[in-house]
Amino acid sequence: MTSANLKHNVLEDDILLIGIDGGATKVNGWSVNVKKRGAAFELGKINAVKSYRNIPGYIGNFQPVDLNRQLSEWQAGQIALTEKEIVQSNCYIEAATACIREIIRLSHKKRLLIGIGMPGIKTQEERGIAVFKNGPRMLDYARRIEQELENFRIELVKPISRLGSDADYCGIGEEYAGNGSFRNVQNAYYLGGGTGVADALKLKGKVIALDAVKHWFVKTWEMQCPAGFSVERYLSASGIQAIYGELIGKSQDELQQAGIYLPQIRERALSDEKPAIETLQKVAHFLALLLYERLTTLYAGWQGLFDFVNPGRPIPAQEHAYRGLLFDRLIIGQRLGDLLEEAQGDAVLWKPFAGELTRLILTSRVLDQAVRDYYCPQGNLNPTLIKISKLREAPALGAGIDAYLTWREENHA
C-alpha cells in the first residue's frame, strides 16, 4: 500500500478488520467497517460467537484463584498459574481462534487486522492477563492466538498491539459509532452490565482511559457492598441471576436450563413473586447508589460510599483535574440496559431506582443547590440524564476501532 493510499484512511480491499469482545463465558467477534475516512465506524455483517463451555477440556466448575491472592501475586511480580488455569486457558485460546477463523471464512479475505478486548488487569506489555476475576489468568494470551492463527496460515497485517480493556472499548465504541451514546456530549458515564460490568468515561469531550484516572475514579468491580460482595454482583446480568437463584434455591445452571434470565425475573416480579421483587429492589438500590457515587466523585472527589474488594487499594484522591464538572448523560448498556429499558416506568425496577437516585441527589450534602437543581429540576430527575445504550456490541466495535486507529497512526496516515 502506498503512502498516498494510506492517507485515505481505509484498509486494503483484501484486509479484514475484526473486533473481538472476550468475556468470562464466551468470545464475540464482529467484522468492522470503516466509514468517513476513519471518522466513524459501524459493525459489519459478519458475527461469530464461541462459548468456552463448548470447547473440549473446559472445566465446568472452574473457580478463579482468590482475587486478593491474584492481586498480591501481580503486585509482587510473581504470578504462579495453577494447573486448572492452564487447562482452562487452552479453551479460551481455542474459542478465540475459532471465532476469528469463522469470520475470516465467511468474509473470504485472507489478511487480518484484529483488536481484542478482555476483562482483567493486563500484563506489563498489555498482551496477557495478570488478574482475572471471573476466569483463568493468561500471561501470553495474544502471543498464543497469533501462533494459532499462524498455524492456520492466517496472515496478520500486524501483531496484536494490546489487549484493551473491554470497558475502555465500550467507551470507544460509544464515541465512534454512528448511534453511539457518547456522541455530541462533553461529560458522560457509561455502565454496561453483562457477565461482568464495564465502566467508561468521557470528560471534557474526550474518552478517558480508566487506568489514567484510577487515582480518583474507582471501577465498579473494585467497590464492595456492605454484604461483602462487589457492586458488580448487583449490576451484572450474571450476578443478578445468581442473586435470584439463591433466593429460590436454584443454581445458575438450573435457571439457564429453565430459560430464566433477567427478563423472566422481571416478569415474575411484575407477577408479585417475592424473590424476584427482592432481587430487583437490590438492583435498583445499588444502581442508584453507584450513579450517585459517580456524580459526587466527579463533582467533589471520592466520598467513601463504598469499601473496596481489595483492602489494600489506595484511598482515591479527592482532588482531580475534572473536579467540579457535571455529567450531561449517564448511560446504561448491554443486558442491564436492556432490562432497564424494558422496565421504564414500572413499579418493580424503574420507579424504585429513579426514586432512590432522586432522593440521594436532593438530600445530598456534597452537591450544592445549583447542582441538585441541575440533576433534579423542580425536584424530579432530569428526564434526559439517564440514557439506554442501543449499542449492544460496543466492546467488539471499540476493539476493532482501536486496532484500526493504532495501525493508521503507525503508518502515519
Image (cartoon, rainbow, N blue to C red):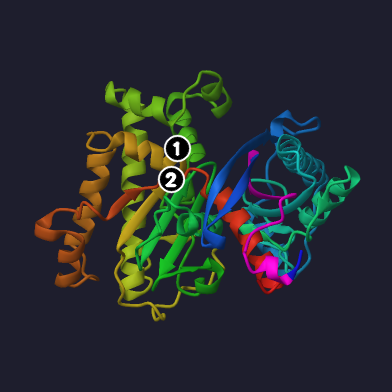
- Pinpoint residue 93: horizontal percent, then vertical percent: 78, 44
- Mark 2 sits on what residue? 235
Residue 305 vs 285, above or below: the answer is below
Q: Nearer the viewer, residue 65 or 388?
A: 388
**Residue type, numbered disc 1:** Ile
Q: Any mark on residue 343, and which?
A: none
Figure disc tally: 2
Q: Nearer the viewer, residue 314 or 96?
A: 96
Q: Nearer the viewer, residue 55 or 227?
A: 55
- Pinpoint residue 340: horizontal percent, then vertical percent: 34, 40
Residue 183 vs 272, above or below: the answer is below
The quarter of the rendered structure image containing the C terminus is: bottom right
Residue at position x 72%, y 29% in the image? 54
Q: Which residues are magenta?
A: 3-26
Q: Disc 1, disc 2: CB below 8 Å?
A: yes
- Mark 1 sits on what residue? 240
- Pinpoint residue 199: horizontal percent, then vertical percent: 47, 57
Q: Is residue 287 left or right of residue 194?
A: left
Is residue 24 a member of the stretch shown in magenta?
Answer: yes
Q: Is residue 300 left or right of residue 104?
A: left
Q: Is residue 380 left or right of residue 205?
A: left
Q: Is residue 23 visible?
A: no
